[in-house]
Image: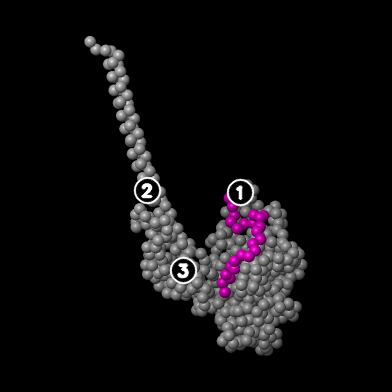
């Protein structure tokens, strides 16, 4: 006979063995699955990390090319700036340029077992002072994982970042007086001195500059700024908008006034593009068909180098232009134009464009837009405001010599401490300014240096108020009669961007500048008050300026990637 209890124990033992086997199989499967998952995770981590490395290598390559070219670009001599972009046309798979050559990494060890190669795939010319460079960056990890990215990168000349400032001085900056109000950022490539707490509704930046011997300090009596609510209620419609546009608006207005400001000391120098040879701007004037009319009369068609106001070729005022506009017959500008002499300007202006003068620009009276931009504060419809202001008037005045405000034939305008040493320090200039007097000893063998005295004779001649030829000062025009015929009057308003290699100075009344002042030296004396409302359409990041190009002075700007994709190794 069998034992029932023993049979039961045998069944239980068999069941336990089966269960244990199943558990062992499950644990084994889980271990195998875990190992597979870990391998997969390691594989994906390597895959992603290699792509990240490739993108980092690409970023470094873009800026190494930019910095190498910038070294070449900023080294004189230069027939014209755009021509220097021919540097890009000398290229191979791993080199770019023929002077200050960029050499791309080719199988370079970049650490942690990664190896990188950058290949220059293409170079295209799409405009004057523009190159499109196709780049590939390939990175291989220690486990053999390889990722390759491609970018099409644009290198170009564009309006300089100095136009992000209401008041930019390529020297010592100075703001003397409580009646000064600047609605925009202020910057100098040297120290900035303030007195009597002027108002600056923007940032203030001073730079360390070995050439000037400045430590990059902001000093003096200090400065103040308005609260957002005060700014909105009192700054007027010509000042830049606020960020945010309104309390009910959820978005931002880039480069708008936020009510918060920063004082930056010991900052870096910001290069101000020098108006050297006018070839680039003459090319633009022709290419863009720039023109100036007064009423229905064409005064400048692209480039003006004819007889001056006296109507005779071969005299002191050759190349000089006088522009006086009224509401019924405004000065109409379209695109960039170049004038080979002085420009005298006064009155109503319409259109969008920049006037380049080979010598001085003399502002003989108010210069006002016929269709001025405006910014409501607060603004509940900023897109509509941007669309409207994009079409409004915008004028650039760019002088290779000086911009002089007021009647320079009156001694009180030019006989100023701010026009001469010791306030103005001597400085080195460009060879292309020698023919308008900025090599004070007239000896190119020892370089090109100006003494800093804008009240001295510049070596040229002018026609005086009697029509006689006589010596000309740096701050004079080339025809006193023609200037006086423009009926100079006290300046209280200038709509436009004032830009000059040398001095922006003179005497005004209580003045408002709706635009910007950018110069090396600044010597403006004013009565009662002085205000600048920065035109935000000049801003490099402002939505107002994205569709506007009035062809202000160019500089080399940061590279921009126009296209990205991953490609096969």
Q: Are marks 2 and 1 in contact (CB under 8 Å)?
A: no
- Kindly report the distance in space between the C-alpha atoms of the residues bearing marks 2 and 1: 46 Å
Which residue position holds label 3? 130
Total marks in image: 3
Q: How is the image coloured?
A: one colour
The label shown at residue 270 is none
- The quadrant the N terminus occupies is top left
The answer to which of 297 and 87 lies nearer the viewer is: 87
Residue located 66% across and 55% down the image: 260
The question of residue 258 being in magenta is answered with yes
Which label was assigned to residue 249? 1
Q: Secondary structure at mark 2?
A: helix
Q: Give the residue at mark 2.
A: 43
Q: Is residue 272 magenta?
A: yes
Query: How dense is the environment of label 1, judged by Cα within 10 Å: few (below 14), some, or many (20 and up)?
Result: some
Q: Which residue is pictured at 40% across the width and 49% down the height? A: 45
Horizontal and vertical percent position of residue 199: 71, 61
Compute the Cα span from label 1 to label 3.
Answer: 38 Å
**First in sequence: mark 3 vs mark 2:** 2
Q: Secondary structure at mark 3?
A: strand
Secondary structure beneath label 1: loop
How far is the residue under mark 3 from the one under mark 2?
Answer: 41 Å
Between 397 and 178, the residue placed more toward the observer is: 178
- State whether residue 514 appears in this view: no
Which residues are drawn in magenta?
249-274
Residue 436 lies, with reference to residue 43, above or below; the image says: below
Comparing 238 with 80, the one in front is 80
């Amino acid at each position: 006979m069998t034992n029932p209890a023993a049979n039961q124990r045998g069944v239980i033992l068999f069941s336990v063995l089966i269960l244990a086997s199943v558990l062992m199989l499950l644990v084994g499967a889980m271990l195998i699955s875990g190992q597979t998952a870990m391998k997969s995770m390691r594989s994906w981590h390597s895959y992603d990390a290699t792509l990240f490395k490739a993108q980092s290598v690409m970023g470094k390559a873009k800026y190494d090319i930019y910095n190498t070219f910038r070294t070449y670009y900023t080294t004189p001599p230069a027939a014209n700036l755009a021509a220097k972009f021919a540097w890009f046309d000398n290229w191979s798979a791993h080199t770019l340029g023929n002077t200050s050559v960029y050499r791309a990494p080719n199988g370079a060890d970049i650490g942690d077992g990664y190896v990188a190669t950058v290949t220059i795939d293409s170079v295209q010319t799409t405009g004057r002072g523009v190159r499109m460079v196709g780049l590939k960056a390939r990175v291989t990890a220690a486990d053999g994982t390889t990722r390759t990215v491609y970018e099409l990168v644009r290198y170009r000349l564009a309006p300089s970042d100095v136009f992000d400032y209401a008041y930019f001085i390529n020297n010592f900056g100075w703001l003397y007086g409580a009646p000064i109000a600047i609605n925009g950022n202020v910057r100098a490539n040297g120290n900035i001195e303030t007195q009597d707490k002027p108002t600056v509704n923007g940032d203030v930046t001073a730079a360390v500059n070995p050439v000037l011997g400045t430590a990059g300090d902001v000093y003096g009596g200090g400065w103040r700024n308005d609260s957002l609510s005060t700014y909105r209620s009192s700054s007027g419609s010509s000042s830049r908008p606020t960020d945010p546009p309104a309390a009910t608006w959820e978005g931002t207005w880039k480069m708008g006034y936020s009510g918060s400001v920063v004082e930056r000391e010991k900052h870096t120098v910001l290069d101000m593009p020098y108006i050297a040879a006018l070839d680039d701007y003459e090319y633009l004037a022709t290419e863009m068909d720039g023109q100036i009319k007064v009423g229905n009369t064409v005064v400048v068609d692209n480039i003006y180098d004819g007889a001056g106001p006296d109507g005779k070729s071969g005299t002191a005022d050759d190349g000089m232009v006088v522009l006086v506009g009224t509401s019924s017959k405004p000065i109409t500008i379209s695109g960039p134009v170049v004038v080979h002499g002085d420009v005298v300007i006064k009155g109503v202006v319409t259109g969008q464009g920049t006037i380049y003068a080979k010598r001085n620009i003399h502002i003989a009276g108010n210069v006002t837009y016929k269709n001025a931009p405006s910014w409501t504060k607060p603004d509940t419809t900023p897109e509509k405001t941007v669309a409207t202001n994009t079409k409004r008037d915008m004028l650039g005045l760019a002088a290779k010599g000086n911009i002089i405000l007021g009647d320079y034939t009156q001694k009180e305008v030019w006989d100023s401490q701010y026009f001469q040493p010791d306030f103005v320090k001597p400085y080195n200039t460009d060879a292309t300014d020698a023919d308008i007097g900025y090599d004070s000893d007239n000896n190119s063998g020892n370089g090109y240096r100006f003494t800093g005295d804008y009240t001295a004779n510049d070596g040229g001649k002018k026609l005086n108020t009697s029509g006689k030829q006589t010596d000309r000062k740096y701050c004079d025009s080339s025809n006193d009669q023609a200037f006086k015929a423009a009926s100079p009057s006290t300046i209280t308003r200038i709509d436009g961007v004032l830009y000059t290699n040398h001095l922006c100075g003179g005497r005004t009344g209580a003045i408002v500048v709706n635009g910007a002042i950018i110069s090396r030296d600044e010597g403006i004396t004013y009565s009662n008050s002085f205000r600048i409302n920065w035109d935000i359409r000049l801003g490099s990041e402002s939505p107002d300026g994205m569709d506007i190009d009035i062809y202000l002075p160019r500089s080399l700007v940061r590279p921009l990637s126009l296209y990205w994709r991953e490609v096969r190794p």
